[in-house]
Amino acid sequence: MASRVQSATKTGAQQPPARQAGAPWRRTAPWRQWFAPWRQWFAPPWRQWFAPRVRGIAPCLLGLAACTGSAVPPATAADAQRAALSRPETTLSELERGRELYLGRCSACHQPIPPASIPAAEWPEHVGEMKERARLSADEEQLILLYLVTVAERPAAPAQ
């Protein structure tokens, strides 16, 4: 190896410069160094106005979205008592499991629909249409339907 290096220097071939400590491995092209101060002149005018404001508003919007309540209300003991009138073996844990399945399986494809936004009699048709896509078993379908129908039949809160 040493003989090859010596022969290259004897023949006049140039060797690459030794890498200096602390020097960047890849240097910036000279035209980029010249162009950097002028780059702001070529930016679209809306970006100069819009970008700082978005940086300030985005955390606020994310915080607001995190604080808003879910459109899908949790099951309550009153819901379990109301459901027990039509199906005596209904428990609160079944309703909660139905809500978990609804949020887990249905939210994979679309935003969960609030149960009260659709009449209770129409929920079996909607769930039946989506059963294949969500790959629901018969038991899971029944739990989801039990939750949706029970919460959809929830009496409206009295106006204050």
Image (cartoon, rainbow, N blue to C red):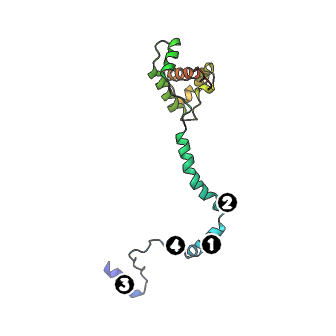
For mark 2, what is the residue? 46
Image quarter for residue 40?
Answer: bottom right
Q: Amino acid at mark 2?
A: Trp
Q: Which mark is residue 28?
A: 4
Determine the residue positioned at 54% across, 74% down.
Answer: 29
For mark 1, what is the residue? 38
Judged from the image, the secondary structure of the residue bearing numbered disc 1 is helix
Is 83 left or right of 15, judged from the image as shown? right
Instruction: Using the image, determine if residue 25 lies above or below residue 56.
Output: below
Q: Please tell me how crowded label 2 is: few (under 14), some (14-19), or many (20+) other residues with Cα within 10 Å.
A: few
Q: Amino acid at mark 1?
A: Trp
Judged from the image, the secondary structure of the residue bearing numbered disc 4 is loop
Q: Earlier in the sequence, mark 1 or mark 4?
A: 4
- Mark 1–mark 3 Cα distance, whole angstroms, equals 48 Å
> 114 or 66, which is in the foreground?
66
Judged from the image, the secondary structure of the residue bearing numbered disc 2 is helix
Could you tell me if the residues under marks 1 and 3 are in contact, i.e. CB atoms within 8 Å?
no
Q: Quadrant of the N terminus?
A: bottom left
> 123 or 152, which is in the foreground?
152
- Mark 3–mark 4 Cα distance, whole angstroms, equals 33 Å
Q: Quadrant of the C terminus?
A: top right
